[in-house]
Amino acid sequence: MVAEEKKDIYLHSEIDSTLKSIAQKVLDDERITVEEGVYLFEHGELGFLGSLADYIRTKKHGDYTYFNRNFHIEPTNICVFDCKFCSYSRLLKHRQEGWELDSDAILKKVKEYDGQPVTEVHIVGGVHPKMGLHYFADLIQRIKTHRPGLHIKAFTAVELEYMCRKAKVSFEEGLTILKNHGQDSLPGGGAEIFDEKIRAQICDDKCTTDQWLEIHETAHKVGMPSNATLLYGHYENYAHRIDHMNRLRVLQDKTNGFNTFIPLKFRNGNNQMSDVPEVSIIEDLKMYAVSRIFLDNFKHIKAYWPMIGRNTAQMSLNFGVNDIDGTIDDSTKIYAMAGAEEQSPNLSTQELCELIENIGRHPIERGTLYNVINDYKDFDWSHQKV
Ligand code: V47
Ligand code: SF4
């Protein structure tokens, strides 16, 4: 549908005057305010939010839908912190239930992917008191030396804050050391929810909101881009979600260092918040759509399919999402342990591409920084199994 026809839909459908004026702003390429963001969550029905988000996505990306080929390494699930939503970590006192991989074991895992066409390794885990900045810097260097072309996306701001504190270095010094040893970028985890009161309810002992933002700002300054997440569907309300996105939008205006925004749905399996019901798929789609509309300075919105399942991930592509990540195997345990949709996340490249093509989009394998690696439009799969 061409943009002009779409414009008519927004302006003539049965929506109130505030929603109309928000739609008009979007069509005029104007930024919406915090109050308008909250209004969209509270009063925008799903179809309306979807068309608005899809209009923006189409304008930014056309039919391109991205995925990448990566694998995850989780060095340990021992963690000094005690986030109430976490199903994965084992406190030090329950150490026997945890795992700790030393540097040789991690390098061995990297070597298992030798010869496979992966472009990224994603390294995150619990915050282990004995695995410090210099241990990880050395590990990164060993991985980089072994496979120089592999993009290393590693350590959440939570891990980084702890590493720098223990090593008694500033964030800038710590991040520069890691960068000089070969780290390329930061993942978006640990953001949870920025509102200080809700954050204290779900994770009161780890890095603060201000520290999370400072670490990402510093990473951007020293030349490492990063992602951002938001954990939704627990104690927060719509205003908290918009406040979170607004703090990201302000920082992105300053640094332009964020690649992608990833809303993460709270899953209630096996954690201290198991009494909190999970939100519906409608709410998931609303979250994607409003983030696409609100975060005008973020180029990409990613749905992490192992968490929400391949069907919801496919639907999300009509609600502003233009990237569905793409782990190639079941190398991450974080979500399976929380009751995520995909207990053994494994989609072949062909399946990922079909999922994208089945809704009329154009599958693109990307590198971490959204460089095009392979264009899979109308790819002939009969000769190749990848
Ligand atoms: O910060 C933990 C979340 C995050 C639960 O940057 C949970 O490309 C839901 O951020 N229910 C870490 N979520 C993972 C992460 C991530 C994942 C994929 C890609 C990227 C990227 C980043 O996982 C944590 C927390 O928000 N998490 N437990 C749970 N029960
Ligand atoms: Fe530790 Fe991360 Fe789990 Fe929090 S979410 S307890 S920091 S592993």
Image (tube, helix red, strand yellow):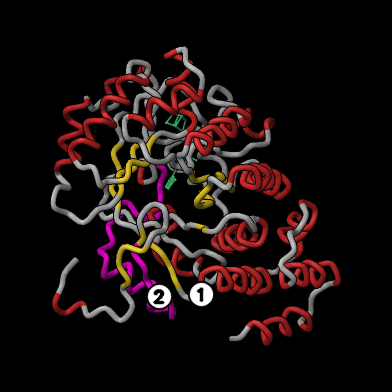
Residue at x 26%, y 70% (from the top left corner): 350
Q: Residue at x 29, y 26 (%)?
A: 98
For the point 62% across and 68% down, which residue is it? 53
Q: Is residue 223 left or right of residue 349?
A: right
Q: Quadrant of residue 36?
A: bottom right
Quadrant that contains the N terminus: bottom right
Amino acid type at mark 2: His
Residue 18 falls left or right of residue 374:
right
Question: Vertical placement of 274 versus 292: above or below?
Answer: above
Nearest to the observer: residue 45 or residue 217: 217
Q: At x 86% / y 71%, what residue is drawn?
A: 17
Front in this rendered view, residue 13 or 183: 183
Q: Which residues are magenta?
A: 338-365
Residue 147 location, quadrant: top left
Name the amino acid, label 1.
Gly
The location of residue 332, given as percent across then percent down, is 31, 44
Residue 362, position as x, y percentages in the image: 40, 75
Q: Is residue 73 magenta?
A: no
Residue marked by disc 2: 362
Task: Please state the horizontal and vertical placement of residue 51, each as a whole percent of the image.
Answer: 63, 74
Element class at badge 1: loop
**Residue 23 numbered mark, or none:** none
Ligand 2: image quarter: top left
Say which of 31 and 90 sits in front.
31
Q: Looking at the picture, how far across and down is residue 139, in whole percent?
A: 26, 28
The image quadrant that residue 191 belongs to is top right
Quarter holding the C terminus?
A: bottom left
- Residue on which the image places disc 1: 62
Left or right: where 234 falls relative to 371: right
Q: Disc 2 versus disc 1: distance between alpha carbons?
A: 9 Å
Image marks 2 and 1: residues in contact by CB distance under 8 Å: yes
